[in-house]
Each structure stands twice: as structure tokens, then as C-alpha cells.
Image: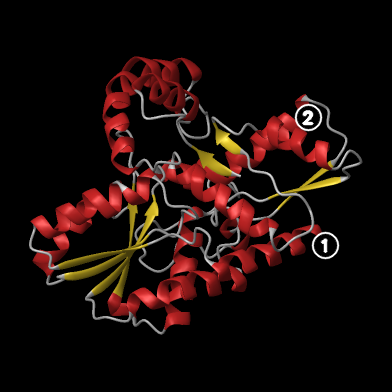
């Protein structure tokens, strides 16, 4: 299961997609009336035309990169497992019911489905909403099969190995900094998920919370762990990498530092050659291809940067597909 995408780059399709996405109470966690006013009255009318242009700049002949890449991952995984593999999206198509029904057509006596949210890290606006939506559809249509879920795999050795191996070829030439740009979330989401009253230090660079029960649902802790483990596997010293957060929406305080603010400022700090990776995304999409590899690169070079190399997401990397097989096997067991 992945995030989803508009059906096309037309403004009407963008409006449909953005309304479904942003009206999700786990994405914008405001009272319904406030969310409705904000999304339908302000954000969608102004954002849809801009988003349509952004999508046009990265749209492939086959369709949305995220959908195309997720389908390719489905096919790559299917070559390695005997069980049928289907794709579902949290927003738009394919709908979870379509995925469930397709599985039942192939296996009428289906006993169990393993859900694989393509999010390495826990966040209420990504992993949690995907899982809860699949559960909701499962219950609504009274399916008899059991539903198991692959948990967040932010520190799983197989995932870290795949991430490191996908990065390794891109790190052979010289660079000043490797920037891990993760999808941002509102700071309030850190405190709304997981253990009530848990203490989080949102200013500490290499840690967030010490309570292990809080770490299970702490997005900031988990992205830091992914970064520490991946850089250790690659032998990258601490002064050669940094973390930032992208894709801010609205005026509420979000996790810092902001990728959009850091990237153009780096050349003034002596960082002239940069490599950027976005590990919170498994499949390349608007946020990676347009926001980072196009706009981020343009900003960096315009402010004195010399080279900007975007490292692709895991997509269908062979080591990642093998790792995915292992994650599914462990969830089944």
C-alpha cells in the first residue's frame, strides 16, 4: 500500500485528490468544520492549479511515477513469492476494496492477507492512516480473511542493508554533505501518537526520546535511527551528513530544520557539493522528483552550489525487493 496519486494532471483531478488527501483527519488533525473550511475553502482552490503544473513536470508517459513505480514493485515482488500480490492506495486508485476483491478472485478460500504499508517510519499521517483505512474497508465489507500488517521497518537490518546498498554507488565521487530529507510532519503529531506524556526533545540533533515505549510511534526518533544506521553501514562520518524535513503544509510548527530553508543556505556555509536522499519515501513521487530533484536542485545551484545529486528512492532495487520478501515472511510468522 502506498500514498496514492491524482488520476491525471488536470485541475479537476487534482481537486478530487487533494480533497480526499487533506480531509483525512490524520493528515490535518483539526475539527471537521475547521478542516473543511481550510481544505475546501482555502487550500484546494489555490493549491490545485499549482499542483497540476508540478505534476505535469514529473508525469511519465505511463502515468504517475508513484503509481507506476509501485506497480513495478508489485511485479518484482510477485516474481519472488508464490502468493498473489495486489496494490492498494490510501488515496484514489487502486482502492483497497479492489485489491481485496482481486485477491479473493485468485484465492477464493483466502485465509490471510499481509498488508505492507510502504512507509518505513510510523506517523499518524502516513503509516497509521494507511493501516486504519485498510482495517476500515476490511470491516465495512465483512471480509472473512485475517489481516496482518508489516510494522514500521525503520531499523530492520534488511531495510537498512537495502537502503545502504542503494545509496553506495551514488557516494563514490566527492561531496561535502549527504542530506537526509524526510517528509515533515507537524510537531504536534509527535505528542499525539504513542505513549501519553512521553518526553520528546525536538531540538536534540541525534535523538528525540529515551522511553522505548514512546519510540515505537515517534516519527522523529525513527528517522534519526534510520539515518544513524545507514550512515554507520556506509562508514560516513558524522560531519558529512545532516537531517532535514520537507513538504511543510500550513502555518502550524513542523519538524525542523526545513529542507526548503536549509538547501539554499548550504552554499554560504561552505557546502558546495551535496547529495540528497529521501528515505521516508519508498517510491519516487512529486515530493522527491519535483520538490527535491527539481526545485531543491535549482535553489541550491542558484545560491552558489556547484553540484547537486539526488539519490533515487528504493523503488524496485533488487536488494530492496529481497528485503521486502523477508519483512513479509516475518509478518506472516
> Image height check: is 212 above or below 45?
below
Residue displayed at 8% across by 58% down:
303
Identified at 39% across, 48% down, the residue is: 184
Tell whether 195 sits left or right of 176: right
Residue 197: x %, y % from top left = 55, 48
Residue 255 visible? The answer is no
Determine which residue is flagged by label 2.
Answer: 139
Viewer-proximal residue, 133 or 185? 133
Distance Cα–Cα, label 1 vs label 2: 23 Å
Q: What element carries label 1?
A: loop
Structural crowding at the residue carrying mark 2, measured as other residues with C-alpha within 10 Å and reported as few (<14), some (14–19) or many (≥20): few
Q: Which mark is residue 302?
A: none
Could you say where residue 320 lies in the image, as x and y percent from the top left? 57, 66
Residue 42 horizontal/vertical position (percent): 31, 19
| Residue 181 in view, yes or no | yes
Instruction: Name the quarter where the N terminus is drawn.
Output: top right
Residue 206 position (above or below residue 223):
below
- The percent coordinates of residue 234 (x first, y second) are 43, 81
Residue 54 figure quarter? top left
Going from the N terminus, do you reach mark 1 or mark 2 first?
Answer: 2
Identify the secondary structure beneath mark 2.
helix
* Residue at point 69%, 56% (across, down): 78
Disc 1 designates what residue? 333
Residue, x 45% and y 31% (percent of image)?
6
Q: In this view, does 332 lie above or below 242?
A: above
Of 312 and 137, nearer the camera is 312
45 relative position to 285: left or right: left
Left or right: 40, with 107 as reference point: left
Of 152 and 113, which appears nearest the observer? 113
Amino acid at each position: 500500500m502506498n500514498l496514492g496519486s491524482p488520476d491525471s494532471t488536470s485541475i479537476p483531478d487534482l481537486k478530487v485528490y487533494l480533497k480526499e488527501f487533506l480531509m483525512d483527519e490524520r493528515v490535518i488533525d483539526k475539527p471537521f468544520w475547521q478542516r473543511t473550511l481550510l481544505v475546501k475553502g482555502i487550500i484546494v482552490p489555490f493549491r490545485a492549479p499549482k499542483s497540476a503544473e508540478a505534476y505535469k513536470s514529473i508525469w511519465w508517459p505511463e502515468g504517475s511515477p508513484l503509481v507506476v513505480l509501485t506497480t513495478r514493485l508489485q511485479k518484482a515482488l510477485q516474481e519472488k513469492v508464490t502468493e498473489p500480490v495486489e496494490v492498494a492506495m490510501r488515496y484514489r486508485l487502486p482502492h483497497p476494496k479492489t485489491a481485496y476483491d482481486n485477491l479473493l478472485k485468485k484465492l477464493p478460500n483466502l485465509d490471510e492477507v499481509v498488508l505492507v504499508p510502504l512507509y518505513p517510519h510510523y506517523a499518524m499521517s502516513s503509516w497509521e492512516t494507511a493501516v486504519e483505512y485498510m482495517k476500515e474497508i476490511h470491516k465495512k465489507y465483512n471480509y472473512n480473511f485475517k489481516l496482518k500488517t508489516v510494522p514500521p521497518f525503520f531499523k530492520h537490518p534488511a531495510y537498512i542493508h537495502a537502503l545502504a546498498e542503494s545509496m553506495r554507488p551514488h557516494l563514490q565521487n566527492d561531496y561535502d554533505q549527504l542530506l537526509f530529507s524526510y517528509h515533515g510532519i507537524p510537531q504536534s503529531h509527535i505528542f499525539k501518537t504513542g505513549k501519553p506524556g512521553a518526553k520528546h526533545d525536538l531540538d536534540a540533533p541525534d535523538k528525540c526520546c529515551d522511553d522505548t515505549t514512546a519510540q515505537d510511534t515517534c516519527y522523529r526518533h525513527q528517522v534519526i535511527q534510520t539515518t544513524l544506521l545507514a550512515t554507520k553501514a556506509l562508514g560516513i562520518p558524522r560531519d558529512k551528513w545532516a537531517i532535514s524535513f520537507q513538504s511543510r503544509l500550513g502555518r502550524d510548527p513542523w519538524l525542523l530544520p526545513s529542507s526548503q530553508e536549509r538547501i539554499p543556505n548550504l552554499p554560504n556555509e561552505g557546502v558546495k557539493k551535496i547529495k540528497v536522499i529521501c528515505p521516508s519515501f519508498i517510491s519516487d513521487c512529486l515530493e522527491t522528483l519535483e520538490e527535491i530533484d527539481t526545485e531543491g536542485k535549482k535553489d541550491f545551484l542558484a545560491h552558489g552550489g556547484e553540484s547537486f545529486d539526488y539519490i533515487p528512492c528504493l523503488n524496485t532495487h533488487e536488494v530492496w525487493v529481497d528485503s521486502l520478501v523477508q519483512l513479509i515472511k516475518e509478518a506472516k510468522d
